[in-house]
Image (tube, rainbow, N blue to C red):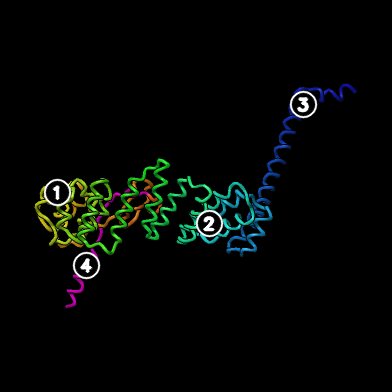
Amino acid sequence: MDMFFIGFRDPLFSIIVFFAIIFIVTFFSYWWGRYKQGQDSKHLDKFLQQFRALPSKDELKVLISSGELSQKSWLLLANSYYKNGEYEKSIEIYNEILNIEKNSDTKEIMFLLGKTYFKAGFLERSKQIFLEILKREPRTPEVLHYLLLVYEYMRDYRSALEVLEPLDELKEDIALDSAYLHALEILNNNQLGEEQKSKKLLAIHKDSGALTYMVFEYLFRVNHEVAWHNLDTSKAKLLAEVLWKCDAKALNLDIISQNSFLRELYTARGDYELAQQSEIFEFDMLIGVEKRVDATLSFEYICDKCKSSSPFAFHRCSYCHAIDSAHVEWSLSRDYSRSFSEENNSFQ
């Protein structure tokens, strides 16, 4: 009998049994996890299927109040809609959360709702929400900044400037915002003439040392002589597009000949022969090729803060809302205006 059970007392047999048990447990745990994951995935797909079309307010109310998802999950879903540009869905979710759940997160949810209204272009609704938050907690810098943006987009520059006062009290740096808003107020003041606007804008530019593109784009458009006289040629690169598109009759040869960038720019454009070559590749190509080539410069603007790009010049970044943060980059492109002109001439 002892001979029969001797195998069970063998240490090697115990080790084999031990590892066999581990294998069985691991095997069943793995496949049970796979099964649960599949079930959870089906449940989530079924739940998200409800949001492929915007639910009605009543449906949303039922879904949120059911507690099937936590508030945090609903906020993540609303943020996902926000990032995808589906602002209506995001707004509905925020509104229903505020209607159903009264808790300490109300201010944060109202702020998110106000931002979404702002992004969707509902400026009046956004303004009312931010003002409501500030009634309860007036010392909230992020809300004040967004309220300033709302007033700016509504072209209510006086109100926007008033928002700077509490920001100043909160030790926020408002110098650039103040200069920018005053410049916008001047540009949109129909009671001021071009000469008055030019003087006031130059004063702001000199005091702040900023808003170069904003000020000189206006000056070159209305009074090129004043623009050339006040131009700091060390900032000519920032104004490359304005200078490139400047009318040939409005050029100031005396100033151009004293600055290497301007000499190369207008040689590349074909107005003068002031440079034989350029370290800037695009300028060098245009200087070296025959003048009849259908090539020109195209421009792109990059925000130094968030690195977003735009084919058009901007004074405030539409993504991060930074002021005077754009720098210009240029590239060679086909001159379609010249091609179109030559095609028209060929039919005459």
Q: Which residues are magenta?
A: 322-348
Labels 1 and 3 touching (C-beta < 8 A)? no
Residue 344 inside the magenta-drawn segment: yes
Does residue 335 appear in the picture of this structure? yes
- Tell me which residue sits at (46%, 47%) in the image: 142
Residue that mark 3 sits on: 14
Residue that mark 1 sits on: 277
Indicate which disc, 3 or 4, sits on the residue closer to the N terminus.
3
Q: CA distance from mark 1 to mark 3?
A: 86 Å
Q: Nearer the viewer, residue 118 or 184?
A: 184
Labels 2 and 1 touching (C-beta < 8 A)? no
Three-letter amino acid code at the position of disc 1? Gln
Three-letter amino acid code at the position of disc 4? Ser
Mark 4 falls on what kind of element?
helix
Judge left or right: residue 148 versus residue 136.
left
Image quadrant assignment for residue 348: bottom left
Three-letter amino acid code at the position of disc 2? Tyr
Indicate which disc, 2 or 1, sits on the residue closer to the N terminus.
2
Q: CA distance from mark 3 to mark 4?
A: 89 Å
Residue that mark 2 sits on: 81
Indicate which disc, 2 or 3, sits on the residue closer to the N terminus.
3
Three-letter amino acid code at the position of disc 3? Ser
Residue that mark 4 sits on: 339
Q: CA distance from mark 4 to mark 2?
A: 44 Å
